[in-house]
Amino acid sequence: MTEPSDRTFSETEGAIMEATYRALREHGYADLTIKRISDEYGKSTAAVHYYYDTKDELLAAFLDYLLKRFVDSIHHIDTTDPEERLELLLDELLVKPQENPDLSIALLEMRSQAPYKATFSERFQQNDEYVRYMLKAVVNHGIDEGVFNDVDADHVTRSLMTIVDGGRTRAVVLDDLTELETARQTAREYVDAMLR
């Protein structure tokens, strides 16, 4: 498994990442510029360029930042109960994106650039591998505890990720957040059928 980046962000870099977040939500990937990010940041473009030479370098760091936030949110889940933990993970993947549909659009735009931009491809692959690792660990834990059926955890995990990715993509492409709700219900039904 590819480990998530152990990169840490200074307070200033964190502020730039938050400005990038806001600019992506407002303008989308296609219309994102360092100028728009710096406007959100409240400083000059030179202040952003001090940390990031190019927009692509900044966006690669932004993907690292998003994964770090996701990992932090997962690590703050208090329960070790496999069923509860799996439900919370799936909520994080399919319910939470409903709060920021504009960011979901921007991320899908960035994902579409992954075949052409190695830094994006690496980050998205790393993110995907880490999320699959987290899901698989919960499934294996549930199998070990006798809570889940003895199944091929890798297959179940990949199937859940297909539901997650499909739901997220459909929600953006069709401009319909109910697709995320449908995907969440489908994931719940799949877990019931396969694991219980």
Image (cartoon, rainbow, N blue to C red):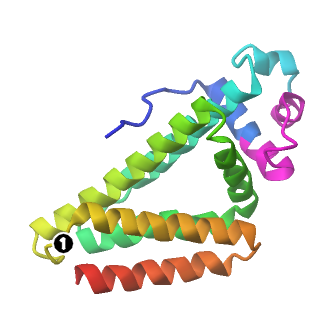
Residue 60 shown left or right of residue 39 in the figure: left
Residue 23 is one of the magenta-drawn residues = yes
Residue 144 shown left or right of residue 159 in the figure: left
- Front position in the image: 34 or 11: 34
Categorize mark 1 by other alpha carbons within 10 Å: few (<14), some (14-19), many (20+): few
Residue 26 % position (x, y) = 84, 51
- Front position in the image: 160 or 44: 160
- Front position in the image: 140 or 88: 140
Looking at the picture, which amino acid does disc 1 mark? Val
Quarter location, residue 114: top right
Quarter location, residue 153: bottom left
Q: Is residue 80 visible?
A: no
Residue depicted at x 31% and y 68%? 156
Residue 88 % position (x, y) = 40, 68
Residue 43 shown left or right of residue 61 in the figure: right
**SS category of the residue bearing label 1:** loop
Residue depicted at x 59% and y 39%? 63
Figure check: 161 above or below 181: above
- Front position in the image: 96 or 58: 58
- From the image, tell me which residue sits under label 1: 151
Q: Is residue 163 visible?
A: yes
Figure check: 33 above or below 84: above
Residue 13 % position (x, y) = 65, 26
Magenta part of the protein: which range?
Answer: 21-42
Question: Is the magenta region chiefly helix, strand or loop?
Answer: helix
> Residue at the front extreme?
115
Quarter location, residue 19: top right
- The quadrant the C terminus occupies is bottom left
Residue 95 shown left or right of residue 191 in the figure: right
- The quadrant the N terminus occupies is top left
Residue depicted at x 56% and y 69%? 166
